[in-house]
Amino acid sequence: MSEPFLQLRSVSKSFGGVRALAGVSLDVEQGECHALVGENGAGKSTLGKVLAGIHVPDRGEILLDGRLLTLRGPADAVAAGVGMVHQELAFCPDLSVAENLALGRYPRRLRFLVDRAAMTERAQALLARIGCDLDVSRPMRTLTTGQEQMVQIAAALGTGARILIFDEPTSSLSEGEAERLFELIAGLKAEGVTMIYISHRMPEVFRLCDRITVLRDGERVGTVPAAATGQDQLVRMMIGRPLEEYFPRHLATSSERVLLRVAGLSSPGRFSGVSFELREGEILGCAGLVGAGRSDVATALFGLDRRATGQVELDGRALPLGRPREAMRRGLALVPEDRKRQGLILMMGGRHNYSLATLDRLSRFGLVRRALERREAERSFRELDVRTPSLDAPVAGLSGGNQQKVVLAKWLARDSRVLIADEPTRGVDVGAKAAIHGLLDRLAQRGVGILLISSELPELLHLSTRILVMREGRLAGELSRQQASQESLLRLMAQGSRAG
Ligand SMILES: Nc1ncnc2c1ncn2[C@@H]1O[C@H](COP(=O)(O)OP(=O)(O)OP(=O)(O)O)[C@@H](O)[C@H]1O
Ligand SMILES: [Mg+2]
């Protein structure tokens, strides 16, 4: 019997008083795609970062090819052949793709001159290896998330990575980009690259991975072969009980009263001529490929796009564009897509982040009523099962999914008439996802009009009364709940986007 390729032995890691990993042991075979799943805060990202040398474990050891691996920093991991594909920007946004791919090791000519031609050639070769043709002179910040990810993968392989760690790689990819990533992963697997794949999306875990390890509260619950495991069983391992993933949705037809009327909404270079109506108690879905303009419409409706033109009526009265405070005062709420950048103040505690959106309601004579704020934050965090050491712990230290929940709690706390939710369940675990679906449904029953932007078609199909489809900055169509299916939506989303 040969030794396992990669071995973790009783690895522990705490942050302050929080035990992120509590004695985790794990074997990974060479060339296998090994999934890490578990609830928000289970320790998945921490485990990935320990392997990538970003976190130094408090206890335990890591063996690669039978040899003890000492990782004092990311450079040690790179030297050992471990690369991580991050969610956050891992590059210098203003440097070109070629420069980023060369970082730290510019080809030199005459000792000090950077050899641009050699740098460009090397970058092109690295990208070609993964079948990606991209103009390497483009600045990094002009790339889509999918392209940036390709550059990260190319960079890791360029430094000789034999183990690649993916942390929720598809959470901001379009369907097409995700598909390309899956094909690349299959190709790399065939070449013998070992992969650790962290995801909340069960279908892709089952499609890509050979074995699945479940973490819960920093401990390993078990490792199972993907082919012999059902989704229900896996979810039970994750949350320790069976889950009704899909609560019975409320099928009440919405009232005829129009809450939000949008006519000819346009923004130069982003989208044009968007018109629709949202009724009381309705969940109006919005489908489209990444880049179709859905989030741009959302931010414009909320008043964050100064160049937007068109007519918007809220509750029968005109809503001036470009005035977010006015929009909020009138009862419009936006759960933004890019929550890290727009939704949270990372250094502040969860409670304060929570109360930012409700300040006007919670304050009297200009003072925040602390007791009330604390009570409401507690209730709302409980409802969404936010795992935080305390209400005042900085949200920067929360796991990705728990940060999402704080933003959601914050916006859902407002007494809104209309809620625009942009990818509300991105990055949250199965249990929280069901809780959020239930919450949206309850809000709709109370009469709130909800515009639900989502890239997960099952989510849209499950919750929406009607679904709008956007394509290249325009409304491409609208489907009723009866007409809508995965196929009909995909067809509308993609139609003619290349050829015609
Ligand atoms: N830098 C940090 N400082 C303080 N606490 C942290 C830090 N990083 C992680 N934690 C805590 O460690 C625990 C595990 O977090 P981790 O990010 O590994 O979870 P996860 O499984 O990746 O969750 P998610 O699915 O939400 O991304 C959480 O309780 C989190 O709050
Ligand atoms: Mg994580």
Image (cartoon, rainbow, N blue to C red):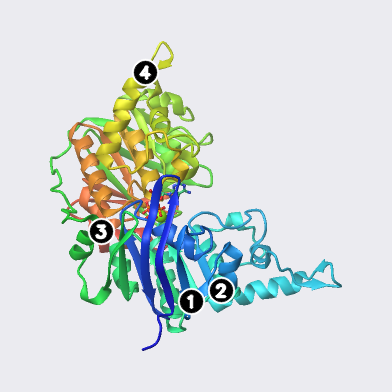
Mark 4 touches mark 1? (CB < 8 Å): no
Is residue 275 left or right of 74 when viewed as pictured? Answer: left
- Give left or right: position of 207 versus 500: left
Q: Secondary structure at mark 4?
A: loop
Q: Amino acid at mark 3?
A: Met
| Residue annotated with mark 2 | 80
Foreground residue, 19 or 499?
Answer: 19
Residue 407, picture quadrant: top left
Give whichever of 68, 36 is nearer the camera. 68
Q: Residues within 10 Å of mark 1 (few under 14, many from 20)?
A: some
Query: Marks 1/2: CA distance?
Result: 8 Å
Q: Are marks 1 and 2 in contact (CB under 8 Å)?
A: yes
Identified by mark 4, the residue type is Arg
Q: Which mark is residue 64?
A: 1
Q: Are marks 3 and 1 in contact (CB under 8 Å)?
A: no
Q: Are marks 3 and 4 in contact (CB under 8 Å)?
A: no
Numbered mark located on residue 238 in the image? 3
Q: Amino acid at mark 2?
A: Ala
Q: Is residue 391 above or below residue 152?
A: above
State the residue at coordinates (14%, 40%).
Answer: 253
